Image (cartoon, rainbow, N blue to C red):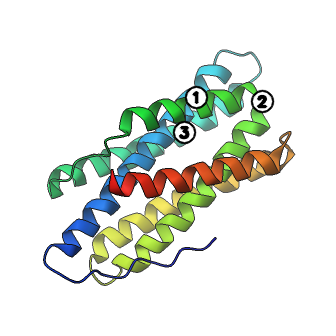
Amino acid sequence: MINKPIPSRPGRGAQSARMAEILRVDHAGEMAAVAIYRGQRSVLGTAAGHERITGQLAEMEAQEAAHLARFERLLTQHKVRPTALAPVWRLAAFALGAGTALMGDKAAHACTEAVENVIEEHYAHQIAELKTRDPDLAAELSTFRDEELAHRDLAVEEGAHGAVGYGFLSAVIGVGCRAAIKISEKL
């Protein structure tokens, strides 16, 4: 399912309303990404023999935390409230991270790949939409997207496709991410 960029809306306040949606959903996504990695590290960080993946997860979490901090500043700057479902998304994301980590390293990587595939597509649409209207934000999103793609590529290199039930796991996570995006834009 490929979504087209949302065209500019007509009417007074439409562009600021769309910017609020973009910032709200991106903030929610980065908050969830941090929670996923924390959930994975809570499981794998205490298990012997998982030092490598725990280090990778910590590094990716740090990048996501930097993205989150930037969106927190943008929310304040633009006077946009975060999603009302932030506590739900944080808990669900932590559970997703912990759950996939309990399934093993490959499932944790499959989770990362599935999430980052959706996020890459999501950011690409926003970048296209913002390219002329807010080129500075579009450039920042491009940088974030490139970092998300690096996370995805690492996950694939580390065996994401070898996870038990990979196709099902990837599909369910992708559907969940797309639903959370749509909901977070509005709520």
Picture residue at 76% right of the left edge, 33% below the top: 105
The residue carrying mark 2 is 104
The residue carrying mark 1 is 95
The image's mark for residue 117 is none
- Judge whether 141 appears above or below 87 on screen: below
- Judge whether 165 appears above or below 77 on screen: above
Question: Rounded to the nearest whole Å, what is the CA distance between mark 3 and mark 2?
Answer: 19 Å
Question: Rounded to the nearest whole Å, what is the CA distance between mark 1 and mark 3?
Answer: 20 Å
Mark earlier in primary sequence (1, 2):
1
For badge 1, the amino acid type reads: Ala
Element class at badge 2: loop
Mark earlier in primary sequence (1, 3):
3
Q: Which of 117 and 140 is in front in this view?
A: 117
Picture residue at 28% right of the left edge, 68% below the top: 18
Q: Which is in the foreground here, disc 1 or disc 3? A: 1
Element class at badge 3: helix
Name the image quarter holding residue 77: bottom left
The residue carrying mark 3 is 59
Question: Rounded to the nearest whole Å, what is the CA distance between mark 1 and mark 2?
Answer: 14 Å
Name the image quarter holding the N terminus. Answer: bottom right
